[in-house]
Image: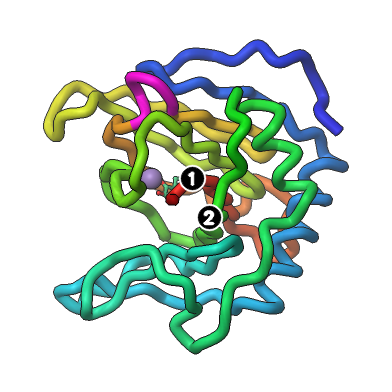
Amino acid sequence: MFSQDLAPLDLNGAKIFKGLLDRDAQLVMVNAVRRVVADAPLFHPVTASGKKMSVRMTSCGRVGWVSDRRGYRYDALHPAGGVWPDIPPEVLDVWRAVSGCDVPPDCGLVNYYGEGAKMGLHQDSDEGDFSFPVVSLSLGDDALFRIGSTTRGGKTQSTWLNSGDVLVLGGAARLAFHGVDRLRFGSSDLLPHHGRINLTLRVVR
Ligand SMILES: O=C(O)CCC(=O)C(=O)O
Ligand SMILES: [Mn+2]
């Protein structure tokens, strides 16, 4: 399933497995995400202050990440009610290939970026144990990804994440600030209506 040997690039301590998923593997992942979305529809999260995030989201796994007027948190239920679907086994194969971790993720967060969507600099810090890495898959349009240090306002570096790239935030980079500044909308034909899917796997506990 994986198109090359596992030699990642380093970006501020994050590991980027460029092109790890070949076209067929990307299509397998898109189909897995479609099954998740069929069970747990994408929704538009709002922040506690009432601001709509530009990405649409859903999750698979034991818990999902949600944000609404009550704030953000992991929740066992979809905002519309009902438990989240399981993390698809083909997605767990990617985790096993790159995480270096025996413990499986218990949240797979799906972000869908349409035209103009972005994600501000943030830390992934709602989990109970930061010794577990975060693994993130990019599918569809190119995204300009920015990563800094573990303190806000520090120096950052940027790179384009392309469809099939897999990023790992672990070790000293586990709590690095990161975000997506913009997409090159329409740069990939993987998704029929373009845009980008990001699938982020985390051990929440
Ligand atoms: O879309 C990405 O590449 C990053 C997503 C992300 O950082 C998150 O969902 O926490
Ligand atoms: Mn994040």
Decide if residue 26 is in sight here.
yes
Find disc 2 in the rendering and name its residue: 107
Q: Could you tell me which secondary element the residue under label 1 belongs to?
A: loop
Q: Could you tell me which secondary element the residue under label 2 belongs to?
A: strand
- 34 sits left or right of 152 in the view: right
Which mark is drawn over residue 94?
none
- 1 sits left or right of 5 in the view: right
Residue 20: quadrant of the picture: top right
Residue in the picture at 56% in, 84% down: 82
Crowd tier of the residue under label 1, counting other residues whose Cα lies within 10 Å: few below 14, some 14–19, many 20 or above: many
- 56 sits left or right of 72 in the view: right
Amino acid at the residue labelled 2: Cys
Decide if residue 181 is in sight here.
no
Residue in the picture at 59% in, 61% down: 61
Q: Is residue 66 above or below residue 39?
A: above
Residue range of the region highlighted in magenta in the rendering = 170-174
Magenta stretch, overall SS? helix
Separation of marks 1 and 2 at Cα, in angstroms: 6 Å
Residue 50 point in image, percent of width and height: 20, 78
Residue nearest the viewer, comparing 89 with 42? 89
Ligand 2 quadrant assignment: top left
Residue 167: quadrant of the picture: top right
Which mark is drawn over residue 203?
1
Residue in the picture at 64% in, 26% down: 98
